[in-house]
Amino acid sequence: MCGPARRARRRTEERRCCDPGAAPGGSLLRVGEGISRRSFVRAGGALGLLALVPRARLEELLAASARAAGTGGGHFLTAHELDTLRAVCGRLVPGPPDDPDPGAREAHVPEAIDLLLGAFRVSPPMIHAGGPFSRRAGGKRDDFTHFVRLDRHAALGWRIRLEGTRGKRQREFAGPVRGLQQIYREGLAHLDSRAAGHFAALPGPAQDAILSDQSDDQVQELVGVALSNTLEAMYGPPEYGGNRGLVGWKYTHWPGDRQPRGYTDAQVSGLDAGGPGFKLDAKALRGMERFLPALAGVRPSRERFWLRSRGLRGR
């Protein structure tokens, strides 16, 4: 095979690794329904492709993104599904008025989960942020926004995780798998069915009652994946779409990524200046001890003295 033909074949194989359904010669960046203008511009900036796209094609993609954004939906979820997911995330990590600190909704956690579910709608998929530095601590550019291209095996693994096996032979080498897309889509619809069609319209206590129903396997399946994804988006790097304004790091006093600036010798060896401390009033302390009895401390028998635990009260 001659050199040009070999290079053309390699480019086609690389394209199919990230999108097995892509036609030969198709665009690497696929934008359509469910892709907002913001997501397209963000992905394009991360890929460094905007300067390479012909102006007419760029305007066409932006117009398609604007039409999709006008529907109110997300990258994968519909507008109604996204409203339901916002309600779920808002109960898992509540914000004002239930909690004085910003919660999942304020951190745009639902939008980050939706971005994960639709990760393969751009190329490379928004799965692994690049590195080594962001602009938060002296870096010249935000390398985190330059997402890493997946190899064939990684792309297949993530497609199985997100999309499921879908009865495809090449994906069912370890048996059938329900992907996150199916779990979220069916789980959110199930929540709505239990709430007369609109889970997000219920008051908070009623939402909590449904989400905590241990007898409903489908609810608990959704809560399990939603809690994991919520915590990742709430406290992870904002380049993945969540932790908007670094709210998840600020109220927990987490400095985030500190390279390349790093820390001085004095900062490494000394105490943090103005740290938040650990203060609980008596009522809050009793509540925590009821929730986690081990926090109250343990007084073992004299024969098993090594099991003694001081607990929060220092007993």
Image (spheres, rainbow, N blue to C red):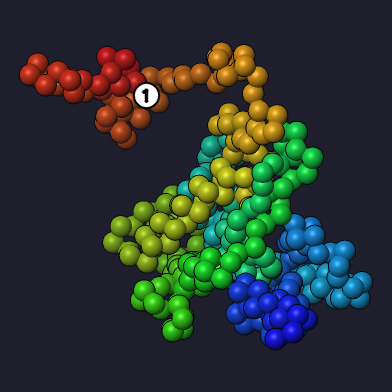
Q: Few, some or many C-alpha atoms within 10 Å of disc 1 (few <14, some 14-19, many ≥20)?
A: some
Judged left or right of residue 90, residue 108 is right
Q: Where does the image place residue 24, in percent across and percent down from the top left?
A: 71, 85
Does residue 165 appear in this view? yes
Q: Where does the image place residue 18, in percent across and percent down from the top left?
A: 62, 72
| Residue nearer the viewer, 94 or 126 | 126
Element type at marker 1?
Answer: helix
Residue 1 versus residue 86 in the image, above or below: below
Question: What residue is drawn where x is 70% and y is 86%?
Answer: 1
Q: Where does the image place residue 102, in percent across and percent down from the top left?
A: 60, 39
Q: Where does the image place residue 223, in percent across and percent down from the top left?
A: 42, 57
Residue 170 versus residue 36 in the image, above or below: below
For residue 48, what is the image quadrant?
A: bottom right
For residue 126, what is the image quadrant?
A: bottom right
Does residue 182 appear in this view? no
For residue 96, what is the image quadrant?
A: top right
Q: Residue furthest left?
A: 303
Question: What residue is drawn where x is 47% and y is 48%?
Answer: 92
How many marks the image carries: the answer is: 1
Residue type indicated by callout 1: Leu
Judged left or right of residue 39, residue 82 is left
Residue 201 versus residue 306 in the image, above or below: below
Judged left or right of residue 125, residue 60 is right
Judged left or right of residue 237, residue 173 is left
Report the residue marked by disc 1: 285
Give the position of the C terminus as an image quadrant: top left
Question: What residue is drawn where x is 60% and y is 56%?
Answer: 128
| Residue nearer the viewer, 3 or 128 | 3
Question: What residue is drawn where x is 74% and y is 72%?
Answer: 29
